[in-house]
Amino acid sequence: MNTQQFIPHSLQRKLEIFSCTWKTPSNIALVKYWGKTAPQIPKNASISFTLSKSHTITTINFTPKDTSATEEIDFELFFEGKKKEDFKPKIAKFFDRIQEYCPYLFSYNMMISSENSFPHSSGIASSASGMSAIAMCLMSLERSLSNTEISDEFVNKKASFLARLGSGSASRSIEGPLVVWGNHLAIEGSSDLFGVPFPYKVHEVFNNYQDAILLVDKGEKQVSSTVGHDLMHNHPFATQRFQQANENLATITDILQQGDIDLFINLVESEALSLHAMMLTSSPYFILMKPNTLEIINAIWRFRKDTGSKLCFTLDAGANVHVLYPEHESENVLQFIDNELSMFCQKNHYICDSVGLGAVKL
Ligand code: PMV
């Protein structure tokens, strides 16, 4: 695998104060990534919708250090205006992993300030949008330091490569509306190292697809995704799962082009339940769904049967339910959510999101 392409060669020497701000989205996987090998290489390919409203905004102020102090990567972290010491180890580990590809990190003091559009502890994973925002800021700095022209395409590719080293799914939070991460024969240009935009024409039924995120449980996850990925080593069904996911990626590649929404529903719901089945059958086993997660799934199935609606659900590594549906069904689906699903959410809280186009410089 060619990681050499991400080591910068022609950077200028004179360093100046630099600052930039990026807004980057969260994403929701349709075919899930669960299981990896070091360094953040996925065991199967995955594909996600990039979201639009659920995002992180991050500003980094880079101040050049005096040259005597370049042994360490120095940064301060503020989250929603407050210093956040407990987030620091994860970011420090991320910087450690990417130092070879971003040697200029040693030359600056960084002040990182972040905020999320979604409420704190909403159970929405912030690592994808958080890591991708930092990666885009670093690429803005790299561009400003480079003596040669860097294309937008390379910026996105390297940002995805860097973000992946912070959190696997973050590699899919740079571009949109659909991103594939992981080497797969059906996807031209796909790679284990970075996400690529879905390279084929998508049927119009999937334009501006909607995602209502039902916040069933806003608490801390009982089992982190790092632990969950690790439990796929020696998992009795791991090999079959990785094969199933890769087959599903080939199938969804056709579905997205042909616009067969019934097949889409079937595949997406099966993927969500397969992900959770891996959790139920690992050792130690665990359950991230809550009783209300199941109430919502059953109500969705009932509504679909009764009305012919094309809504479906998917799940992340948590209890919240993502309700996916075509834009033209918005009115009916939102009424259904208000009347029959919001009662299963904490404080009746849900977020109406839709598919988006990726990172934006502010
Ligand atoms: O990026 P991580 O390591 O937090 O893993 C995310 C895994 C899932 O969200 C459960 C699935 C996915 O593909 O996004």
Image (cartoon, helix red, strand yellow):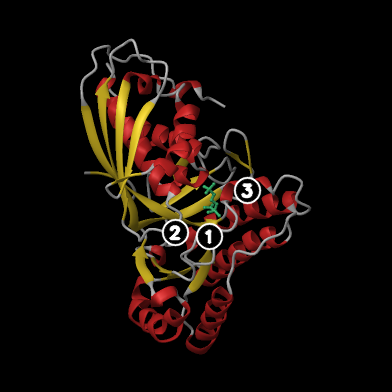
Residue named by callout 2: 124
Q: Position of residue 331 (x, y in %)?
A: 33, 80
Q: Position of residue 9 (x, y in %)?
A: 38, 14
Residue 225 placed where, x, y %? Answer: 57, 50
Label 3 crowding class (10 Å Cα cut-off): few <14, some 14-19, many 20+? Answer: few
Gap between marks 2 and 3, in whole Å? 18 Å
Q: Is mark 2 within 8 Å of ligand 1?
A: no
The quarter holding residue 71 reads top left
At x 48% / y 27%, what residue is drawn? 96
Q: Earlier in the sequence, mark 1 or mark 2?
A: 2
Q: Nearer the viewer, residue 2 or 189?
A: 2
Q: Hey, what amino acid is under mark 1?
A: Asp
In the rendered image, the residue lying farthest to the bottom is 306
The image shows residue 153 at horizontal and vertical percentages of 35, 34
- Mark-to-mark CA distance, 1 and 2: 9 Å
Q: Quick one: quadrant of the C terminus? A: top left
Q: Residues within 10 Å of mark 1 (few under 14, many from 20)?
A: many
Q: Kindly identify which residue carries mark 3.
A: 227
State the residue at coordinates (55%, 37%): 192
